[in-house]
Image (cartoon, helix red, strand yellow):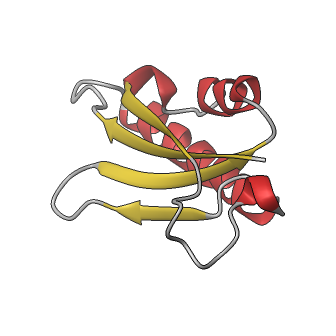
Amino acid sequence: MHLYHVRMDVDIPRDLDAAVRADTIAREKKYSQELQHAGKWPHIWRIVGQYSNISIFAVDSPGELHEILWNLPLFPYMTIEIQPLTTHPSSIVPGPEQI
């Protein structure tokens, strides 16, 4: 398993049709919750005061993460930063690569 820290900043155009906007946001919520239930998206936090989040993804490969992100309904309106994670040598908790 590979862990990734992912920051997503969303910038939906203000002139996007209201119905399209509402539908896209609803599809985004459904898709993200499906991934959370499947254990692929174990953590998501809102960044206070921004339309942004910090998330942790637990996936089998970088390609799987790419597919997950590419299929986010809000993907066309996002700027995404990805940082791969690994266990810190001082951690007392085993990392995913040790489980």
Q: Is residue 7 left or right of residue 90?
A: left
Answer above or below: position of 16 versus 5.
above
Answer above or below: position of 84 versus 48.
above
Q: Position of residue 42 (x, y in %)?
A: 65, 63
Q: Is residue 73 left or right of residue 98?
A: left
Nearer-the-camera pick, 19 or 56: 56
Q: Outermost residue, left direction?
A: 49
Q: Which image quadrant: the C terminus? A: bottom right
Quadrant of the image occupied by residue 64? top right
Answer above or below: position of 50 versus 95.
above
Residue occupying image coordinates x 20% and y 53%: 50
Say whether residue 29 is visible.
yes
Q: Position of residue 24 (x, y in %)?
A: 53, 37
Q: Is residue 26 left or right of residue 36?
A: left
Quadrant of the image occupied by residue 77? top left
Q: Is residue 45 left or right of residue 99?
A: left
Q: Outermost residue, front direction?
A: 89
Quadrant of the image occupied by residue 56? bottom right
Q: Position of residue 97 (x, y in %)?
A: 76, 52
Residue occupying image coordinates x 78% and y 65%: 37
Nearer-the-camera pick, 53 or 12: 53
Residue occupying image coordinates x 58% and y 57%: 87
Nearer-the-camera pick, 86 or 45: 86
Residue occupying image coordinates x 68% and y 62%: 95
Say whether residue 34 is visible.
no
Q: Position of residue 44 (x, y in %)?
A: 49, 62
Answer above or below: position of 64 versus 33.
above
